[in-house]
Image: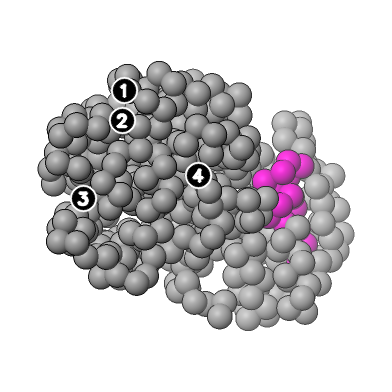
Amino acid sequence: MRKKMKSLFLIGMSVAVVSGCTSAAGNTTGKSASKSGGQVNIGYLSGLTGWLASFTKENMNSIILAQEEINEAGGILDGKKVKIIDVDTASTVEGAIKGYQKLVSADKAVTAIGPETESMLALLSEAPKSKVPVMSPFAGSTELDKVGGNYAFRTAASDSAIGAVRAKVFMENGYKEIAVMVGNYEGAQSDVAMFNELYKENGGKILKEVTFNTGQNTYNGELKNIANVKPNLVYYSGGIDTAPMIFKTAKQKGYDWSWYVTPDVAVQEFIDVIGKDAAEGIRTIIPMEDEKNIAFKTFNEKYKARFNAAPSSGYYNANAYDLVIATALAMEAAGEASGSAINDKIREVTNPPGKEVNNFKDALKELRKGNDINYQGASGPIDFDEHGNISSSYALMEVVDGKWKQVKFFAADYLE
């Protein structure tokens, strides 16, 4: 559910393109090589530079991990190897549109994984025409709730769902009156609008809502307006570019309310910048994989072995990995390497009924036996609804001694 923001941590950062991430031409729109053997091109619209850079590197690792797993199992469709075609969008909508056009026309990619909310919205009308699906691991805006499902899918939970979880958790923990600080851009506004509605429906009261702009020299006035209503809890919905200044200032001013933050800030870099003393006790509720899930455990182990580091929470790494695996399984089920095959079959291989499988190799075996499958992803069940959305599990996270720690896990049926 990654919303629009700018990263101050990785300006000028360059990320090495890992094995196999180069362009390759094919035959027809939305269709890669069709003969036995050959190559299937999967596009990755990545913000290697710009505000998405902090998420792109680990998402890229996850996508490469999926590519290698597929190819080590022999590929799909009589030995076709999957190849990731990476395009740097510079973290802009314009870059995503140009990148998508390149993937479709020059690279003959069968899908485009990676666009954030604004880019996803911009590509919704083009994807069905080009027959190349757009698929996001972190676009969470409520604007996507009822418009996807036809060449548009996401493995990120909607802000409407996470807003409902957050509202319920707040009330269960006795936070019946809170204040809100919200960034003046679509992603943050969408998040807060849905949360406010659901929180009030549950009996909660918003004492004060303060909107801030990015790039200000100071946020003293906004913080003072919050302090005037004497809240016990403040919910911050905004980007990681503005958060350090706001939280450092609040610490310096001695404001001692509890903080909950948007998932956009629930990354280690935030703690490192503001310092562990200022970060101690800050909480968030984020879409989170079930640590007991076999597929997640396996993904975690493979990621550590391959990249010599654990995948970070809050980066939607398993969500990106699952999109590549599900895409490959859909093409295998369809018997064709094309965007239309993915669009037609992705629900069939990820939704019940069917034999539950939690890795590509076992799923491939079942498909080749003629059996229906229900792929259980590393990010959890990825049962796409008619609009291309999924239900997610969640976790309550807290900063403890300079690290994000899981306090409580909420299964996907928590709201039922």
The Cα–Cα distance between marks 2 and 3, rounded to whole angstroms, is 28 Å
Callout 1 touching callout 2 (CB < 8 Å) = yes
Residue bearing mark 2? 32
Q: How many other residues sit within 10 Å of disc 1, few (<14), some (14-19) or many (≥20)?
A: many
Residue bearing mark 3? 302
Which badge, 3 or 1, is on the more N-terminal residue? 1
**Please, what is the three-letter code of the amino acid marked with disc 2?**
Ser
Residue 302 position in % (x across, y down): 21, 50
Residue 223 on the magenta segment = no
**Please, what is the three-letter code of the amino acid marked with disc 3?**
Lys
Kindly state the secondary structure of the residue where label 3 is placed. helix
Kindly state the secondary structure of the residue where label 4 is placed. loop
Which badge, 2 or 4, is on the more N-terminal residue? 2
Q: Which residues are magenta?
A: 177-192
Quarter of the figure that contains the C terminus? bottom right
* Residue at figure coordinates x 50%, y 23% from the top left: 101
Which badge, 1 or 2, is on the more N-terminal residue? 1
**Please, what is the three-letter code of the amino acid marked with disc 4?**
Tyr
Callout 3 touching callout 4 (CB < 8 Å) = no
Q: Is residue 253 above or below residue 232?
A: above
